[in-house]
Image: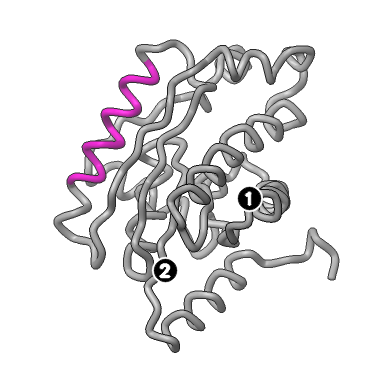
Amino acid sequence: MNQGAINYQKELEKLIEKNQKENRVPALFLHSCCAPCSSYCLEYLAEFFHITLFYYNPNISPKMEYETRVEEQKRLVEALNHKVTYPIEMVEGNYDPERFYEMAKGKEDLPEGGERCFECYKLRLKEAGLYAKEGNFDYFTTTLSISPLKNAQKLNEIGNKIADEVDVAYLPSDFKKKNGYKRSTELSKEYDLYRQNYCGCVYSKLD
């Protein structure tokens, strides 16, 4: 099958159905880019998984923006925990922007949505995969595919490659499907979430 032809939402639904038939509630380590993007993902997945949300985004600039976003993420998790089937835990990774700038060296002028972004996906997903391995999670994945501006095929391709390296399964996903992005905007309004107007890094802000 052509990699570009894979419907990752359908793959996720099949996997959820299989786990339900086996009465399994697996442990999922979910990387989040921000509270608005995670809102629908958490609402949807918390019915089927024990989720630990991982906030790891060294790309975000400036530091005040990072702090605003992480506080919004904590606030959302706390609010959702009054409603979801299985409580959500949260882990905040290190805020180390130098790691991002090192990765972006030589790619500063590349267009948004291209190779620099793919390397940024790799940076964050690799960290999530390593944490998932250390914590004996069944799966890891990211909320990034909910954005219409993010390449879900590339995210899943990178995630599956890292899954082989860390020996933890990557949960297939394309969260923008089934009106996921639309639902995230509704939840953002419902919880009055801070919605940034750029992805996070200094280069996306310039764009």
User: In the drawing, what numbered circle is on residue 176?
Assistant: none
Corner quadrant of residue 43: bottom left
Corner quadrant of residue 174: bottom right
Residue nearest the viewer, comparing 84 with 168: 168
| For residue 187, above or below residue 198 | below
- The three-letter amino acid code for the residue at tag 2 is Pro
Task: Specify few, some or many for label 1: CA neighbours under 10 Å numbering under 14, 14-19, or 20 or more.
Answer: some
Q: Is residue 114 left or right of residue 136?
A: right
Report helix, strand or loop for mark 1: helix
Give the farthest residue toward the bottom: 21
Residue 114's spot in the image, x, y percent?
75, 31
User: In the drawing, what numbered circle is on residue 166?
Assistant: 1
For the C terminus, the quadrant is top right
Report helix, strand or loop for mark 2: loop
**Which residue is depicted at the point 66% across and 47% down?**
155
Corner quadrant of residue 120: top right
**Discs 1, 2 touching: Cβ within 8 Å:** no
Q: Which residue is mark 2?
A: 26
| For residue 159, above or below residue 56 | below
Name the mark nearer the viewer: 1 or 2: 1
Residue 38's spot in the image, x, y percent?
40, 46
Q: Is residue 71 magenta?
A: yes
N-terminal-most mark, 1 or 2: 2
- The three-letter amino acid code for the residue at tag 1 is Val
**Which residue is depicted at the point 28% across and 32% down?**
72
